[in-house]
Amino acid sequence: MSVLDNVAVAPAEDDAAGIAALAAAFAAQRRAFAADRAPPIGTRRERLGALIGMMTANRVRIAAAVADDFGAHPAPASDLIEVLGVVGRAAHVLEHLDAWMQPSARHIDPALFGTASARVEYQPKGVIGNMVPWNFPFDLSVGPMVDMLAAGNRVIVKPSEYTPACAALLAEMVAATFDADLVTVAIGGLDLARAFSATPWDHLLYTGSPNVGRQVMAAAAANLTPVTLELGGKCPALLTPGAVTPRNVESVIGTKIIKSGQMCVSVDYALVARGEVETFVEQARAFMARAAPDYSRSGESTGMISPRHLARIEDMLGEARDRQARIVELEDGGAVDPATRRMPMSLVIDPPADLRVMQEEIFGPVLPVVPYDDLDEAIARIAAGERPLGLYVFGGDPAVNARVLASTHSGGAAINTCAVQSALPSMGFGGSGMSGMGRHHGVEGFREFSNARGIVVRGDGDMIDAFYAPYAKAAALVDAALSPG
Ligand code: NAD
């Protein structure tokens, strides 16, 4: 099959053609789904096997495309997250799919329903749209596709306009692997994105910012399309008193420099006991000196996705500087490289609350370090803000860590580490409140993209006619059921 057979592929600059191609692809998938509403497990396994083959065969090209779009990107990080992460996810699903597809028997009261039986069956939803952000172009397109195909659906993916090389490669890979009426890719700009969110999907997954998420949900509401929204926000790391150790600081800074901070589950800011802030700074310096001494000039660093995104982070740092906030550069002699858009990692110590670094999701290699005097004050600060996608708690006392979790809300959480809650194939991943709704990954993902259809089969000896007039039978039944003793 050639790319040209894949009907939804259209040049990025031609949204009108892309929108028409999307409508045609959607109609074709709808027809195909109507003819095949319940693909058996063998078919689903074949599709997942093809997906694994597609990812492994294109591993080197994937790393090259990601580096192309980001200006600079470590290939092993692409291998780990974009390829191995997705393959691991598919392998986990293959292992559990049989169990997940089994109907789930439910209790049915024999006094009222006699010998009837009840069960929930997980039925495919149909044709699902997936709107992908630029930061993980394969992990967030092909990863959820694992869950969607496992649940028996058909899928159309819309990559971000910021990752043209990845989008073109994804379209080519998908066209070479799947029939377009099973999986296809829709490429285009803002008009196509709007048309995509207004398409009457059986389910729509959107990953991106809360602002656009709101518009996507409004467009989906017109069709009553159910949505999964994977959004962003400010994920805090709370280091409880005594928790500033080299291992914990490595976790915070090491996570922050993954993808130069352009990761939804990155640490956005760290809350540190006031008396431990200087130790945190020293340990952060020591970690960078050991792990990535020439960070912004080395192969360890990822570029900002566009000049505009680079300028945004520089502006945020400039504002902090203008307001006399203390900025600690963690790389001696580091500088922004406009060609590859790489930049050094900085801490902003005790920033005023009205600075942009404290108001907006940062999405870059800048970490505000916010001192606290009392742990409860730090917990209250987290609880008073929007619910983050991830909350990271560091400390050696499980009771204190549990208190932090019980007093706050977040999509996911990790104790003594960061971001790992988003990387497990066995565990649903998603947000809460402003960080989103719904889950993918694991059995939660399988169920998210399934219709949990409750089914009752009538037997004998029931009292179902108590629900029908005349209601004298119902009155007697209720009196008997509710009378004391
Ligand atoms: P974004 O929300 O700014 O833009 C995403 C896409 O939305 C763009 O490709 C654009 O074409 C499209 N768009 C813009 N306006 C639209 C509209 N009115 N209707 C339909 N589509 C429209 O997000 P981004 O910059 O691609 O990604 C960064 C954000 O994504 C961050 O907030 C980050 O935290 C979040 N994120 C979340 C997760 C997660 O799993 N929760 C993962 C990665 C990124």
Image (cartoon, rainbow, N blue to C red):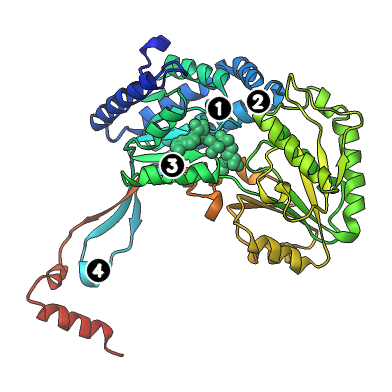
Earlier in the chain: of badge 2 and badge 1, it is: 2
Going by the picture, which residue comes out furthest to the bottom? 485
| Image quadrant assignment for residue 251 | top right
User: Residue at horizontal 81%, vertical 27%?
Assistant: 296
Q: Residues within 10 Å of mark 2 (few under 14, many from 20)?
A: many
Q: Which residue is mark 3?
A: 216
Measuring from the top left, give residue 359's x and y in whole percent: 67, 51
Q: Ligand 1 closer than 8 Å to the CB at disc 3?
A: yes
Measuring from the top left, give residue 113's x and y in whole percent: 21, 67
Q: Is residue 396 above or below residue 203?
A: below
Q: Nearer the viewer, residue 69 or 300?
A: 69
Earlier in the chain: of badge 4 and badge 3, it is: 4
Measuring from the top left, give residue 161's x and y in whole percent: 52, 25
What is the distance, in whole Å, between disc 1 and disc 4 at their CAs? 50 Å
User: What amino acid type should be assigned to the residue bearing mark 1?
Assistant: Phe
Q: Which residue is mark 4?
A: 110
User: What amino acid type should be assigned to the residue bearing mark 2?
Assistant: Ser
